Image (cartoon, rainbow, N blue to C red):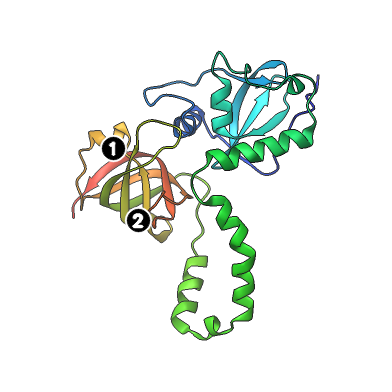
Amino acid sequence: MEYTFIIEPGMYNTFENEAEQIAKCKEWGLLSEKASKTKEFFYKGYGMNLSCSIIGFADKITAVIEFDNKQRHCIHPSFLKEMQASNYGQKLSAAAKETADPEEVKEEAVKVARQEETEPIEETKIEEPKVEAAKVEEPKVETSPKNKTKKEKAQKVQLPEDKVEMTATVKEFTTVPNHFSDNDDEVVIYELVSITDPLTEIGTAWSSHSATLKKMELEIGDMISFVGKIVAKKLTKHPVPYKINNPAKIKKMDS
């Protein structure tokens, strides 16, 4: 049986392993911080209660779930979180209990995403065409050697797809708000981040202040080496453009 409400994902990221899936679900508030394994999720609505699994994400506010019939569907994480409540469905309109029109479902998903997401992601996307137009109309930007050098240098940073060995210096310990949880997330901000082979300077990056990192009892100024995956993901309310996922084999280095 095929479901007519499906919003098929285009390009999306699949989880490499269960650990990455658990970490993302914690970030979305779908699992508690103490969870060590994933659980079964349910898609409720339109008279249905369907078992599903979270297999990846299209972007930071769009989860990709898969049903037993292998159909895949895009959904906002907070919307999926609401569906896990035992009383979910009582507030749904009677019209939504029948087979849903795909266009109506898409409009509802977009509405929920805009209401739930507090970070200015959508505003940035809307303004992108204006920024690009300004670059074309104002050749003065091209005449500045300093600006041109900085842009070319930024474009040359190509992040590896796999885990790599890296070094970094602890710059700051801080917290950022988690809109899917009552508690703020603890994070570590690093400077002088570099990939060791081939040697590539990254600059600043951040990671969750995980239990593994806490055991290291790191202090500001500590230089460390580790293995991890680095991705382009900005830290909320901080000018830090890259995130280090699941750093492992962490060692303190002599400064």
Which residue is labeled 2 in the image? 193
Helix, strand or loop at label 1? It is: helix
103 horizontally vs 153: left or right: right
Observer-nearest of 9 and 153: 9
Say whether residue 83 is left or right of residue 35.
Answer: right
Amino acid type of the residue that numbered disc 1 sits on in the rendered structure: Leu
Q: For the residue labelled by badge 2, is the local secondary structure a helix, a strand or a loop?
A: strand
Foreground residue, 142 or 191?
142
* Image: 91 above or below 141: above
Quadrant where the C terminus sits is: bottom left
Q: CA distance from mark 1 to mark 2?
A: 16 Å
**Residue type indicated by callout 2:** Val
> Residue 53: horizontal and vertical position, in percent?
60, 23
Residue bearing mark 1:
213
Residue at 41% in and 22% down: 35
Give whichever of discs 1 and 2 has the lower sequence position.
2
Q: Residue at x 49, y 30 (%)?
A: 25
